[in-house]
Image (cartoon, coloured by chain):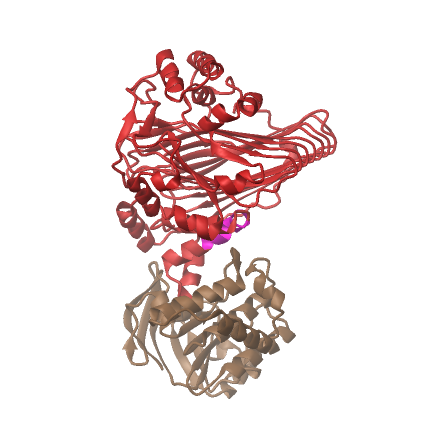
Chain colours: A red, B brown
Amino acid sequence: MQPEPVVVENLFHCKQQKFKGIVMSKYTEDDLKKELETKEYEYGFYTDIESDTFPKGLNEDIVRAISKKKNEPQWMTDWRLEAYRIWEQMDEPEWANIQYKKPDFQEISYYSAPKKADPNKTLDDVDPELLETFKKLGISLEEQKKLSGVAIDIVVDSVSVATTFKKTLSEKGIIFCPISEAIQEHPELVKKYMGTIVPKTDNYYAALNSAVFTDGSFCYIPKGVQCPMELSTYFRINEGGTGQFERTLVIADESSYVSYLEGCTAPARDENQLHAAVVELIALDNAEIKYSTVQNWYPGDSKGKGGVFNFVTKRGLCETNAKISWTQVETGSAITWKYPSCILKGNNAVGEFYSIAVTNNFQQADTGTKMIHLGKNTRSTIISKGISAGKSQNSYRGLVQINSRAEDARNFSQCDSLLMGDQCGAHTFPYIEAKNTTAQIEHEATTSKIGEDQLFYCNQRGIDTEKAIALIVNGFSKEVLNKLPMEFAVEAQKLLEISLEGSVG
Amino acid sequence: MLKIENLHARVEDKEILKGLNIEVKPGEVHAIMGPNGSGKSTLASAIAGREEYEVTEGEIALNGEDIRELSPEERAHAGVFLSFQYPVEIPGVTVTNFIKASINESRKAKGLPEMPAKEMLQMIREKSELLEIDRKFLSRSLNEGFSGGEKKRNEIFQMAMLEPKLAILDETDSGLDIDALRIVANGVNKLRSKENAVIVITHYQRLLEYIVPDYVHVLYNGKIVKSGGKELAVELEEKGYDWIK
């Protein structure tokens, strides 16, 4: 995303600007430091699975080797090579409000697969150790199958390990499989749509992903079909020194509906792990896609060492009367660079973005959305909740663009920031470009701080400080949490509490 | 119930309470009156255990136990309730959810399981009727956009739900119109029992016409300078605080 900074200031009206108590008590300040040091990343274990990893470095041969390893047709290999050549000519973007040591792209291994994985295997054949990993993550596949009716595709490092529920889905004509499988089995769909929403030339990380993506999920919902269950992908980086580049493509054909969940974890490591995914959504006429993410990659330790660099390009296209809803809960990663966007191409198309971004310790997040209004009577809603603690920096960056032909377009944006302590930062960069005078754009922003008054009030009612913070944060995030599917909302709520443990402000 | 002896307390470097004594027995209602800046709210905060209010000397005993070292939440679990003069807003947290967290945290501290939902709902129904609270009010965010009267009524509603041993009402009458005052006072009166005690902090005698105290104390310059029965409040109203100085 390269937003042109054309800010039309008089279009903003900030209905509210709240600044709450600034004082911090001594107790909490000391407590904060102690507890932050002892706080550990809950998912930071490493699974010892034999894996098949490429040597470090990136060149055309590596790209060819990835393609060969996956037994891809020539058109795919060529597609990758073209992307690689584009990437080579590009520079890493520097406009985001983040500071980090740029990764050395020749020091990364671009392919790592658990050795025992075999695409033809069923769930029963999956490496027991891997299943154990999923148990540690709290996702027992068997239970998922029985209880929640969630079909799940799990990508560990670079290979998609198991796709459950495939049969149930295929009866409805729904295709839900690893993207590598889709390239083999449904080349016509992949060829038709891949790279149409996020082209190879889109940005540095998207170009890199296009060249080296190793797996990801593919989903196609046929005309008029309402997907009967939540589809889910779980991404986990396991191997050290590897990058993970998933590619997800979701196509909702006319008048269909799908709700898609994405969860992410990674083990704790000293070095920074790179993650650069691309997600493309296509909602054809009257279709609806709901895409929810809970991102909990390793955020680095309390001193800012390690953590995942997360550079993600997510974008969706809405045809006439179509709707795309992005909901994200971002609690992990050392660096988050992510702007799930909607291109509202058709008339009456609707785009929504609901986001909670939590940063603690030395985490940095620059996240937001782009709503591109092309069609008439298109509508978009942006609700962004940023929570910053420790020494972290949390930025909202959003673009609302109303094209000259987009009559009667509407946008409502609300950006709320909650600060804990006095060493963190919250930033808002809203860009608005309106080229049609019938547009109605509203922007509201608030900044608040968890005040000593609020904490004492809770304490007086018998609620201790940790619990009080959880309560206040949940209240603050409620509008977004409510948008998540039920099971996910519970997990997200728990994650918020874990991420902010000890960060009393 | 509550015994305070020679209490000295300060905020930052300013000594506000300068040797205060009071004893409150179960079943009693005590009113504390006094001019602005005499230390009324400091006394409430010191009993509730607010961090910035440092007790430098003296004792605060609740049911014979010294509570000076207890955290505010531990004091709450022991049965201390403070109705705030300025209740804070917690956006996104409903009145019901807040009370639920409050009740269950106190139960947890006592080793009790969470209150069953049915029981909680039953209790909410009873207490909200007692305080003439509209049920819709309970699903609003805590104190957000509440009128002064709603805030105070919400405080008393929480008190009713938590059933404290010692309730301190800090200027609960301020910002209330006469109808709200009557409802709040009625609520407090209905909650009075032989087992619990109430301290009413107020500027004016008005509230005391509804909540009739057993004792009235006049706080001036960090000390109780005069104590008496309910007639003392009337006398103060007539003569003003200059008479006490």
Q: Position of residue A220 (x, y in %)?
A: 56, 33
Q: What residue sits 38% from the left and 12% below the top?
A: A60
B204 horizontally vs A63: left or right: right
Residue A121 in magenta stretch: no
Quarter assignment of residue B61 = bottom left
Q: Position of residue B127 (x, y in %)?
A: 55, 76
Q: Give the camera-side residue of B231 and B245.
A: B231
Residue A327 visible in the displayed image: no
Q: What residue sits 54% from the left and 68% below the top?
A: B154
A4 horizontally vs B73: left or right: right
Total numbered labels: 0
Residue A476 in magenta stretch: yes
Q: Give the camera-side residue of A126 and B207.
A: A126
Residue A256 visible in the displayed image: yes
- Secondary structure predominantly adopted by residues drawn in magenta: helix
Residue range of the region highlighted in magenta in the rendering: A472-482
Looking at the image, residue B20 lies above or below residue A313: below
B145 horizontally vs A499: left or right: right
Looking at the image, residue B238 lies above or below residue A29: below
Q: Position of residue A24 (x, y in %)?
A: 38, 51
Q: What residue sits 29% from the left and 25% below the top?
A: A53
Q: Position of residue B146 (x, y in %)?
A: 59, 61
Q: Give the camera-side residue of A35 and B113.
A: B113
Q: Give the camera-side residue of A409 and A361.
A: A409
